[in-house]
Amino acid sequence: SQTIHQWPATLVQPVGSPLSLECTVEGTSNPNLYWYRQAAGRGLQLLFYSVGIGQISSEVPQNLSASRPQDRQFILSSKKLLLSDSGFYLCAWRAGTGVDTQYFGPGTRLTVL
Amino acid sequence: DAKTTQPNSMESNEEEPVHLPCNHSTISGTDYIHWYRQLPSQGPEYVIHGLTSNVNNRMASLAIAEDRKSSTLILHRATLRDAAVYYCILRGGDGGSQGNLIFGKGTKLSVKP
């Protein structure tokens, strides 16, 4: 069966520090991968998606970036965090074709102080 | 993507059925109706989806109006663990290359013991 992992589960970082969040998927190949952010009390916002290794599409311009170095690995990064980057970051995957059932990871709660 | 409209919140008593409505008057002929839910401090999870016919699975039932302009997610016996935000989302059948899900504000379901 397929599983999706995210780490760390929680993170507290000072403003201006770098960020690296990792997401890995097991049990499937060539998935579509997604990064979402949910600010406190808000809905989910799609940040990036990837249909293959090295292929990244950005939905919202900001100081975050994403990379997909391997088929089942998706990384969210920032060189310098802002206060507004605080939130709940969720990774999701979907089979490459067919109806769009997405499966979400457990999330990373990031607090920028 | 067509827009959906849901009530902001609903309350239910434990072990009673719950009917969560969703209006999607601009739905296109190829849009699938998806429902996800998000428990507190967790990532969203898939609940059910359908196109035209009513659908049942172990979690819930989906009743789709004949004109497809509205649908209702039915939880047959609400439990305290069903307290969550429920999202109704429309997506095209093949999802395109992104397969993105656009989350609205959803309906926050509270379940009273």
Image (cartoon, grey):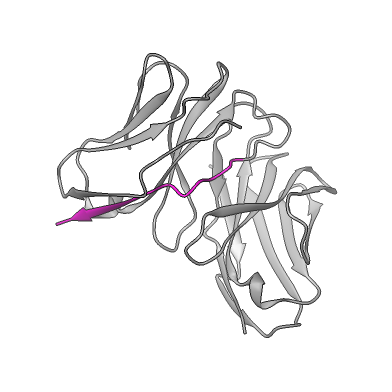
Residue stretch in magenta: B101-113
Above-or-below relation of A75 to B102: below
Viewer-side residue, A44 vs B105: B105
Residue B79 is situated, as x and y percent measured from the top left of the image, at 22, 49
Foreground residue, A33 or A81? A81
Question: Would you place residue B88 above or below residue B69 in this image?
Answer: below
Describe residue B1's horizontal placement relative to residue A42 as left or right: right
Taking B75 as reference, is A38 left or right? right
Asked if residue A14 can be seen in this view, the reply is yes
Query: Where is residue B77 shown, x and y percent of the image?
Result: 19, 40
Give the quarter of the image for residue B61.
top left
Residue at horizontal 46 percent and vertical 59 percent from the top: B42
Residue lying furthest right in this view?
Answer: A54
- Who's the residue at 35% across and 44% down the image? B7
Q: Residue at x 61, y 32 (%)?
A: B1
At a point 46% along the width and 46% down the height, the residue shown is B45
* Residue A27 in sight from this viewpoint: no
Q: Quarter holding the C terminus of chain A? A: bottom right
**Figure disc tally:** 0
Residue B7 highlighted magenta (yes or no):
no
Relative placement, left or right, of B28 versus A35 is: left
Return the x and y of residue A112 as percentages of the image width and height. 63, 79
Residue A2 spot, x, y in % from top left: 56, 44
Residue B102 colored in magenta in the image: yes
Vertical placement of B57 versus A5: above or below? above
